[in-house]
Amino acid sequence: MKGSTGMDMQEEIEGLAILIRDLRKHKNLTLGELAARIGRSVGFLSQVERGLSKPTVADLTAISETLGVSTTYFYSLEKPRELPWVTRPGERRTLYYAGGITDVLASPNMSAGFSMLESHLAPGATSGEGHLTDSSEQGGFVLEGQLSIWLDDQPEPVTLGPNDSFQLPPHSQFRYANLTDQPARVLWVFR
């Protein structure tokens, strides 16, 4: 399967693996130290760093927070573009997560004041069991399907449909899912 960049899925997964491994080593953390800090096993993290397993959105958020970078850091492998302020579908990076979520970087660059992702959620897709805690302010606009969001300690999610939007302050604790049998697409904006 070719991603929106023309790279196949395995190439994108391996690119993410290299970024995680290199950043962990740059921060002088062992595999065991990072695994302990994100609450995952060394074996799982080792498989992620070798491109054999995909992290969930919650896993990658925990990794980015622990290593002191925004989750958008993992989209940093630049693709050649016709114009520096425009991205076309074939010029975008794609991240494939466990749990049925695929994120495509829609922003032309990540050095601006905000970044945009188009998130594709398969039926039943989830960001992971645990809550995400991201230092970024973020929001979204549901393009199609439904997105359910659990914020803080709320036992029941808020379900958003097409043309609904949301905005979460930095350090919000949340998780999200597509609880339907239809795919969903969401435009996420991070600052």
Image (cartoon, helix red, strand yellow):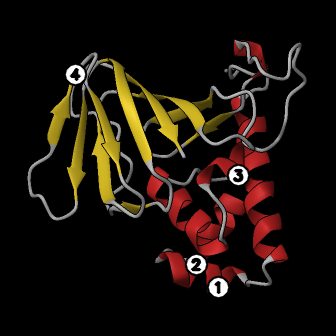
Near mark 2 (Cα within 10 A), the count class, few <14, some 14-19 or many ≥20, is some
Q: Is residue 50 visible?
A: no
In depth, the one of 28 and 134 nearer the eye is 134
Residue type indicated by callout 2: Ala
Q: Do residues under tags 4 and 1 come within 8 Å of each other at their CB atoms? A: no
Residue under circle 2? 35
Residue 32, numbered label:
1
Q: Do residues under tags 3 and 2 come within 8 Å of each other at their CB atoms? A: no
Q: Residue drawn 49% across and 62% down?
A: 135
Residue type indicated by callout 4: Gly
Q: Residue drawn 56% across and 57% down?
A: 60
Q: Is residue 129 visible?
A: yes
The mark tally for this picture is 4
Q: Which of pointers 3 and 4 lies earlier in the amino acid sequence?
A: 3
Q: Position of residue 83 (x, y in %)?
A: 86, 15
Q: Is residue 154 left or right of residue 17?
A: left
State the SS at label 2: helix
Q: Which of pointers 2 and 4 lies earlier in the amino acid sequence?
A: 2
Near mark 3 (Cα within 10 A), the count class, few <14, some 14-19 or many ≥20, is some
- In the image, residue 52 sits, relative to residue 67, either above or below, namely above
